[in-house]
Structures are given as structure tokens and as C-alpha cells.
Image: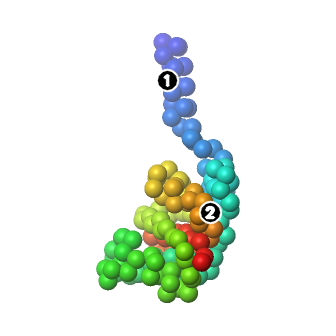
Amino acid sequence: MRTLFALCSVMLLIGCADPMPGASSVARAGSFDAAVNGLRQASGAQVLVEQPQLRRAAQAHADDMARRGYFAHRAPNGDGAGKRIARAGYRACGWAENIANGIPTRAGVFEGWRRSRGHRRNMLQRAYTEYGLARSGNIWVMVLARPC
């Protein structure tokens, strides 16, 4: 019986282990910038720099989704991230967008994106050098890009 209890305890601890302890511990510290850049540096990618125009593009999309009650990369009028980025005055030669809904914290949204293959791929894409992060309620938008 003791052996069974010990085995179950070990399995429980293994199940709770974080597959990437470095990135997760940074996220718990509360800094999204440090978390995303820690993840990138661990994979050999350069750091991302927060960019005000990309933040404006992300904020416009988060606000629009909250105001109009939808959750999608494309607005009901068909506008996508590329148009929003251009409207914010940023000339992008490559971009990606992550969105999330229902997550109350920066650490939580980072963890969700980190654990999602597609979102993680966007955050690790070496071509992107800048990003903007925005929130409206519990709707989050991250725009990643590289300037022309």
C-alpha cells in the first residue's frame, strides 16, 4: 500500500510539473515582456521590443471586439490585422496576431499562448522584432511584426 501511495504521489508531482520552467516562472513574476523574451531567448531568438504603433493596432482590435461582441482575427467588415497595423501608421513587412478571451491576467494569457502550438509559433517567429499587447476587459490581442 505504501508503494502504491508513493507511486501516486510521484505521478501527481510529475503531472504538476511545468514543461518549460524558465518561461513559466517569469510569467508568474508578472512581466509579459520578460516572459515572452525569456521564451524567445531560450529558443535562440532575439528579444522583441514593445512598439507603440503595434500596441495601438492591438488595442483597436481588442476594443472593437469588446464593443461589437465578436471574437475573431477579422472584424465583421472584413478588416484583418494587416489593415489595423497600417491604420496605426506602422509599415510591416511581416506580421502575426494572437488573440485570447476570458483570461484575466497577463501571466495567464502568456501561459495560454505559450502552451498553444500556433500562438507559441507566432511568439517564437524569428522574423518578428517588435510587438504590441493590448487588452479590453478579458479580450487580449498581441500583434507581432517586423518593420520594412
| Mark 1 or mark 2: whose residue is earlier in sequence | 1
Picture coordinates of residue 29, whole percent (x, y): 67, 56
Q: Residue furthest left?
A: 76
Task: Look at discs 1 and 2 and give the one toward the viewer.
Answer: 2
Which residue: 46% across, 51% down? 117
Which residue: 65% across, 66% down? 48
Name the residue tied to disc 1. Answer: 8
Which residue: 63% across, 50% down? 43
27 w.r.t. 8: above or below: below
Question: Callout 1, which amino acid?
Answer: Cys
Mark linked to residue 32: 2
- SS at badge 1: helix
Q: Image check: 143 left or right of 52?
A: left
Q: CA distance from mark 1 to mark 2?
A: 35 Å
Image quadrant where residue 40 sits: bottom right
Q: Nearer the viewer, residue 15 or 142?
A: 142
Q: Residues within 10 Å of mark 2 (few under 14, many from 20)?
A: many
